[in-house]
Image (cartoon, coloured by chain):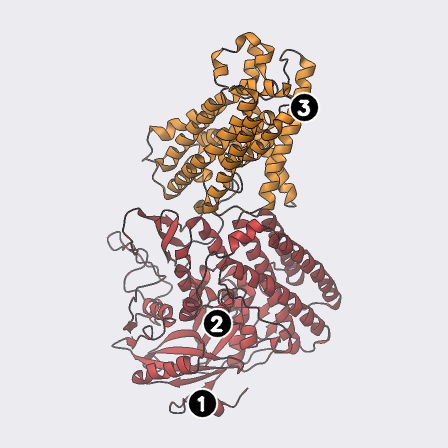
Chain colours: A orange, B red
Amino acid sequence: MIFFFLLQLVAIPVLSPLAVGIIRKIKAHMQGRVGASVLQPYYDLWKLFHKDEVISEDATWIFRFAPYLIFAVSVAVGIAVPMVTAVPAAFPGIERLSFLALSDFLVVIYLFALMTFFLALLGIETGSGFGGFGAAREMMVAALAEGGLLFSLLVASVIAQSGNLMGIVVNLQMMPLETLFPLLIAFVGFAIALLAENSRFPVDNPATHLELTMIHEAMILEHSGKRLALLEWAAANKLLIFIALGANIFFPWGVALQADALPGLALALVVFAAKAAVLLAGIAVIESTMAKFRIFRVPDLLFTSLVLGIIALSISITF
Amino acid sequence: MTDIAHIVSRYGIAGYPGQLSGNTYAFPVPEGDLVSVIENLKGIHGLPLKTVAATDERETHGTFRIYYVFGIPKEGIFLVPYLNVDKYTQVFPSLTPLYHEFSAYEKEIKSFFGLLPAGHPDAKRVILHSETFPKNLYPLLKDFAWDSKTTLSEEEREWPEFQTYAGEGVYEIPVGPVHAGIIEPGHFRFSMLGEEMLRLEPRLGYVHKGTEKLFEHLPMEDKLKLSERISGDSSFHHALAWSQAVETLAGVTVSEKARILRVVYAELERLANHFNDLAFIMLDTGFSFGGSHGTRIRERILQWNEKLSGSRFLRGVVMPGGVTKDISTETIDELQNDLDVIEKDFSEVIEVAEETVSVLNRLKTTGILDRDVAEDHGALGVAARAVGLGLDARADYPYAEYQNIQFSVPTEETGDVYARYRIRVREAHQSFRILHQALTMALHAEGPLALELPSLPADSQAVGIVEGFRGDIVYFVKTDQQGKITRVKVRDTSFINWTVFPYIVSRDVIPDFPLINKSFNLSYTGNDL
């Protein structure tokens, strides 16, 4: 039990830079470049943690405090998400434990909203024009992406008759295959929300140096040193959490239901790695093969995500 | 070359006796007649204005002079009406109310000579920043102590004022002069309404290097190096324009071999830059595939440049009198073959981009330049061809060996980023076509690589014009009584196209600005000089 808790606590922050590194590596290959090592994000974090910081005279306590909060939230949400195992099945008696209340999908969504809120505050914190852009755009994207995210997860929740992410995975595994069809539609809506929430193509360009076009990068432009490292790391955590949600909520097979059988856990880990790799490769392919959208086309895309969620939901209710 | 008497009568300038000098026909115009002469040449006959150059000839002729250089396409001669400006009153009539195209030149003359363009609606100082340079500093005057340092105390500094917009929700965004990417410095002041750009005011001059003054003082061989360093991406074309101006002054025609090799090098420079521009246009839409492959193909050209000349940017290749680097027969064969491979490679990359809807969606209807605006400002090069103005110095004022080479000048009509993108794609294919012809001709070309230049004639002037990858580059070169070069006026394409720039963005949102900027890819150093 303690072991499981610790595993969930460290798994996301330990593996998340790797996920970013894998996307970059695949992108590099698709562009005909060798690319940096998949471990480069770890080196970058290490480097940033050892650098001095520059903090604007106009910065308030939010500027200093929010990176810690954002990082902490990202780690906390990590505990709540089924990665290799969905533990409530293994320990039926602990369902009421408080940290599992964290696994409620609404809690997860609005913890992400909390991160976004503080990120946007950081953007406008120092009064720089670019940060203001970033914050305003992030608010637009976040508000519009929320619907798609909410409804796509709601579909899984309705089918599985559970609001708990762990419970959803367990119950979905028991369901007959044909009842899961709406999940596929919901997954498309979720994937769009994933891209938007994680500042990925076609909404945002994580690799750009053009301040005028940035969303996420513009908000953290004024940060440096360890606070920047925390923000980058939190963004990586968020990405991996979304990957885990996408891989395990919508494709629940392979998630171990016995948290105490090591061979089963090992197999589940392999399956998760494979599913995550496919999703990461998908992101890399999208980022290599298309251009970013014009900013005012982004709402259309996010609206599509919402509509897909609603369609999937209505199908799942009529089933 | 057409008979000069014929030209004089055709353009109705017989009333102003002038002199043939180099490739110019220069004639003095009394101040009162200036407007009618310019209206006649530009308005009635539609001759394109190529540059306006002021000179300080107080020592030799007792006046300042302003030369208005008009090109006559396909004639190989430039009509140059000039105005004597009184050295005491230092005022000349502004032509800006008549044709907006003169505005940038007149502001420049005011800034560098202190001559006042009477009637100019907005004759503010350009390039020389008032927070850096003293108020009454006119560096192109002959008595300016060019090798002295200027200082400005804190109280004397004047910080710039920008045009401001007011209204609910309107705000300003300052961008630059230091940017995040490795690009040149320039300040942009945006007035914004949400994401929409209301107005853009560029402030340039951060890379002012006193180039035109240095041209007056550096020894002859260093002038060549200076021209190569005006705009690093156009090293060859700037040096070529300079060399052609000097050769015309000296009355030297370079050998056939040199002329053909100049075409080869010129097109290689154009290809490398077009590939680069296309790559960065695609990259700025976020299409990283096009970005990385475009720069990869550009690198192949740069490596050929190095192989042929020892310089990736073709420095030290051209000189007044000819070229310095020959290309052997075996290398020509190898280059011909490799060019085919590169063109195929290039076509494949462009094909992928053209099939990517998301890229086209970003490029089309973004950053539209109106044809009216382009014509009013005298827009040049890629920007002009993208609105259907088929200006190309290679076709209009053939130099080197272009008159014996088959190529077309592509034009587009829509004037958006996509049109400028298409122009570059189509021109790249034309460059391959030109290169194949020139390389075949180079196999049998005769003559020495370079000729010795005689000393230059006194009190003469000549124009050197080439089509760089952005558009035409014009050098106006003037000698004094001793036949020494006393004034070099450099007009890079960017000097004109920067004036068009603020008019483009007002229908766009700011996240598209970097893309629009890249589709013009103007030179800062070429403007600031």
Residue type at mark 2: give it: Val
Residue designated by label 3: A270
- In this rendering, the answer to whether A6 lies above or below B31 is above
Does the CB distance between marks 3 and 1 fall below 8 Å? no
Q: Nearer the viewer, residue B314 or B171?
A: B171
The residue type indicated by label 1 comes to Val
Where is residue B197? Give x, y as percent. Answer: 38, 52
Query: A127 or A116, which is in the foreground?
Result: A116
Is disc 2 surrounded by few (<14), some (14 to 19) or many (20+) residues within 10 Å? Answer: many
Distance, label 3 to label 2, CA atoms, is: 66 Å
Q: Is residue B115 visible?
A: yes
**Horizontal and vertical percent for residue B372?**
42, 69
Marks 3 and 1 belong to one chain? no
Task: Report, in whole angstroms, how far the alpha carbon at label 3 lies from the one at label 1.
Answer: 86 Å
Badge nearest the viewer, 3 or 1:
3
Q: Are marks 2 and 1 in contact (CB under 8 Å)?
A: no
Which label is found at residue B8? 1
Question: Is residue A189 toward the left or the right of residue B213 in the image?
Answer: right
Q: Is residue A50 visible?
A: no
Seen in the picture, residue A182 relative to A254 is either above or below; the reply is below
Image x and y of residue B429, in percent: 63, 64
Q: Is the C-beta separation of discs 3 and 2 under 8 Å?
A: no
User: Residue B51's quadrant in the figure?
Assistant: bottom left
- Chain that bears disc 3: A
- Residue B474: which numbered mark, if any? 2
Asked if marks 2 and 1 fall on the same chain, the answer is: yes
Q: What subunit carries mark 1? A: B
Question: Which labelled disc corresponds to residue A106?
Answer: none
